[in-house]
Amino acid sequence: MKLLMMGPPGAGKGTQAKKIVGDYHLSNISTGEMFRDSYRKKESLGLLAMEFIRDGHLVSDEITIEIVRRRLFESNKEKNFLLDGFPRTIFQAEALADMLDVMQSSLDAVIQIVVSDDVILTRMVGRRSCSICGATYHLDFKPPKVENVCDSCGGVLYQREDDKRESVKNRLDIYKIKTQPLIEYYKSRGLLYEVDGEKSFEGVYQEIKAVLEGLA
Ligand SMILES: [Zn+2]
């Protein structure tokens, strides 16, 4: 099974992906992880990628495609995987289709976790982090026992820049602009499956599972 999972920041994509990968024995192919790994090995690809990341840019299509290509072809042709963080552009999506074509294969499904902006804002803007140990809380869903104080170490809680309303809104806008073309691309190829990301973790997981069972 070859899967792709998409969803806005705060949609719970990472935790769902982890469970799916475990349950279906898929390799989790994460471009972010491969870049970090390649960087640690001081490979030119990883060093180049880190330059983009350090400057706050998306890694170029060429470098991204190359690192995925190596993974798909050199690790004895991955047969079952879930792609994370790739493709991010139509160009990358077409490169992926070409690579899979060479492997005489294709994607089975693209799962899109759909969550409204309001729900994402509530989830993210309420987050608080401990200034000392990094533990995370949520004003509504997981409040500390004492207001603004970390349960485990007594540190002061604060709101990360990333979790502030304007920052979240901004990331949601960027996500939409960037991924809308990809969503259309996969929809037109009959590969897109939408799941309701506003359900509980278990509810979302069951929806994804239903999609995957339907493919078999
Ligand atoms: Zn703490």
Image: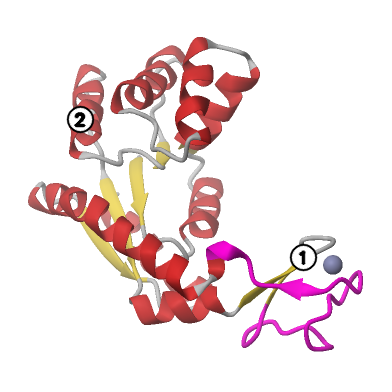
Q: Of residues 138 and 26, which is closer to you in this image?
A: 138
Residue 158 is covered by the magenta coloring? yes
Q: Which mark is residue 135?
A: 1
Q: Secondary structure at mark 1?
A: loop
Circle 2 Cα neighbour tier, 10 Å, few/some/many (<14 / 14–19 / ≥20):
some
Question: x, y percentage for residue 152?
Answer: 89, 71
User: Is label 1 within 8 A of ligand 1 (CB to nearest ligand atom)?
Assistant: yes
Residue at screen point 34% across, 45% down: 4
Residues at marks 2 and 1, CA–CA distance in whole angstroms: 40 Å
Question: x, y percentage for residue 130?
Answer: 78, 68
Give the quarter the ligand 1 occupies: bottom right
Name, please, the residue furthest toward the right. Answer: 153
**Which of labels 2 and 1 is toward the front?**
1
What range is drawn magenta here? 138-162
Residue at screen point 19% across, 32% down: 91
Q: Which residue is mark 2?
A: 97
Q: Of residues 163 and 97, which is closer to you in this image?
A: 163
Residue 157 is covered by the magenta coloring? yes
Which of the image's four quarters has the N terminus?
Answer: top left
Above-or-below relation of 148 to 194: below
Q: Is residue 148 visible?
A: yes
Whether residue 211 sits left or right of residue 133 in the image: it is: left
Q: Of residues 56 and 187, which is closer to you in this image?
A: 56
Kind of residue at disc 1: Ala
